[in-house]
Structure formats: C-alpha cells, structure tokens
Image (tube, rainbow, N blue to C red):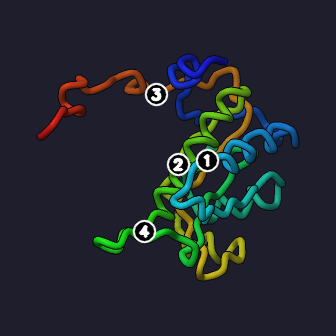
Amino acid sequence: MDFETVITERYSVRKFEDRHLAKEDIEAILRAAHLAPTGCNYQPQRILVLNTDEAVLKLKDCTKCHFDAPCAMLICYNKEETWTRPYDGAQSAPVDATIVTTHMMLAAQNIGVGTCWVMHFNPAAMRNAYHIPPEIEPLALLVMGYPHKDAAPIPMHSTYRPMDEVVFYDSF
C-alpha cells in the first residue's frame, strides 16, 4: 500500500480471526520496529512477541483489553539505555518505544494485520507473567491478528478535531 492508504485505512481492530500470525508477518513487523529512529540510536526498545496459545492465555490475566487476539507484542524499553536531555533530564526511551510501536502498527496495516494499541494493562502483572527484569519498562501493548470479516472501526474513528484546534504556527 502507499503511505496515504496505510494511514487512512488503519483502525484499531478489536475482532480477529482465530489463528496465529505467520512467521513472515511477524518478521515484517519486527523489521519495521528495528528500523525505527531512536534518540542517538541507542535502541532501548525491547519487544516481547506473544504468538502461542500459552503466552496469549497469560496476557488475559494482565489486561481486559486483549480482544481475544491470537497474537500480541509488548513494547518495552530499557531504562538504563536512554539518551537524556541535559536541560531538564527528560529521557528519550519512552518516546523511542512509542515511535517503535507506531512503526510496528503501520507495518502491520501494510501487510493486512490488524492491531489495537492497548495502554490498559497491569505492568506488575506483565512483569510477573513474562519474567520482565526491573530495568525493562513495559510501555505499550499491540494486540494483533488477521482482522475478522466482521471487524470494523468504532463510530468515532473518523471524527477529527479541526486542524486549527491542534496546529499552531509561530506561537499558541
């Protein structure tokens, strides 16, 4: 797909076919993540691929927003591998992991894999279920799979605020 089509047709899929993702589709999504820009190219992202029945079952104890997806990827970052802005101490790793997640979501759309970005999960439950070490911070969960034939965007999906409410030139 061309980029305009990818960003126009992408929506949060909440109903999936009951089959795991093919290895080549997982690899295509991970390739996009690997190419994402990060602060000073530190690449603090850590991605946990959950594409087995056992791994997905554990996910259901960590979030109610799993949508019975047959696959998920938990995007984390290493708190010890982040560029830090010298003026105020802001760290790039959370932003880096967010950029990585966006690349993954758009790459998935491009190959016909539906995703839903989930922030509603219990980080402590994730740490426990998947043995995540303390220096690794879970940031975003992409539940994913091949969209069910009945999958559709929510009604507000195509409702946008006017551009002049969100874009400003020179000053606010």
Q: In screen coordinates, is 72 left or right of 124? A: right
Q: Name the residue under label 1.
A: 36
For marks 3 and 2, give the CA distance: 24 Å
For marks 4 and 2, give the CA distance: 14 Å
Q: Mark 2 points at which residue?
A: 99
Of labels 1 and 3, earlier in sequence is: 1
Mark 1 is surrounded, within 10 Å at the Cα level, by few (under 14), some (14 to 19) or many (20 or more) other residues, namely many
Quick check: 62 above or below 7?
Answer: below
Q: Mark 4 points at which residue?
A: 91
**Element assignment for label 4:** loop
Residue at 19% across / 33% down in the picture?
Answer: 168
Q: Mark 3 points at which residue?
A: 154
**Dot 2 and dot 1 residues touching (CB under 8 Å):** yes
Of the residues tagged 3 and 4, which is closer to the observer? 4
Mark 2 is surrounded, within 10 Å at the Cα level, by few (under 14), some (14 to 19) or many (20 or more) other residues, namely some
Question: Which residue is outermost to the bottom?
Answer: 134
Residue at 52% across / 67% down in the picture?
Answer: 122
For marks 3 and 4, give the CA distance: 34 Å
